[in-house]
Image (spheres, grey):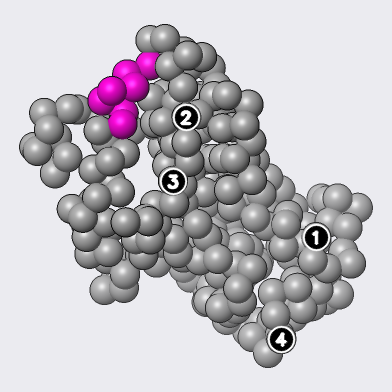
Amino acid sequence: PHFTEETGIEVRVIAVGTGQALRVARNGDADVLLVHHRPSEEQFVADGFGIRRYDLMYNDYVVVGAGSDPASTQTATDVADALTRIADHRSLFFSRGDDSGTHKKELELWARTDIKVADSNGEWYRETGRGMGATLNMASSMDAYTLSDRSTWLSFGNKGNLALLFQGDPPMFNQYGIILVNPKKHPHARAEEGQVFIDWMLGEVGQNLINSFQIQGQQAFFANAAR
């Protein structure tokens, strides 16, 4: 609403995971991308589908699970240790399994361990193929572990026995980027309006609004656009 009030440009949001968002944009069905998996974003630009990628804001990922913490992740030394403890204990872990930014990050974190989760898929490691909220609901109903972005965890209402168990390791950093779709690939893309939106988000007003957004009294995102 703030952006539209200032510019008269209306924004229609398509809220999907990063992988699907990138596919939508590659197909020419979006003007601007706001996603959170930097390697995929940089590949999107390298392939000519995006003009330029900008840092916009960040938060982080957290490991959540039953408050009883059967795998003792709370005392882990780092996220690789936390995940290894879950695997060694064969505690139930739900993965989004949906090619989202969170799913991509989760696989990167598992790659820091010696665990090959593909070998255990369907056993203690299970892919939901669902979004973050649905995956958290499944974890809540079965006292399972999962990886969540902090903002979704804060806004999730059906926590049940779930608790935030591990956080703060640098690899759990979650950077968001914003990209203008290349009109040379998709001439119908509204590049001029899209760039106005990007500039506004990267500017003082947009960055201040990002910093002021709270969930349950906690700041959900931290603006970090280069000024």
Question: What is the spatial separation of the Cα atoms under label 3 and label 2, in whole angstroms?
Answer: 10 Å
Could you say which disc has been placed on residue 54 in the image?
Answer: 3
Answer few, some or many: residues within 10 Å of disc 1's Cα (few below 14, many 20 plus, some between 14 and 19).
Answer: few
Nearer the observer: mark 4 or 3; the answer is 3
Q: Is residue 5 visible?
A: yes
Q: Could you tell me which residue is drawn at 60 percent across and 73 percent down?
A: 170
Quadrant for the N terminus in the image:
top left
Q: Are marks 4 and 1 in contact (CB under 8 Å)?
A: no
Front-most of residues 187 and 112: 187
Tell me the SS state at disc 1: loop
Which comes sooner in the sequence, label 4 or label 3?
Answer: 3
**Closer to the N terminus: mark 2 or mark 4?**
2
Asked if the stretch drawn in magenta spans residue 3, the answer is no
**Mark 4: which amino acid?**
Thr
Residue receiving disc 1: 111
- Tell me which amino acid carries mark 2: Ile
Q: Is residue 85 above or below residue 144?
A: below
Q: Main secondary structure of the magenta part?
A: helix
User: The C terminus appears in which quarter of the rendering?
Assistant: bottom left
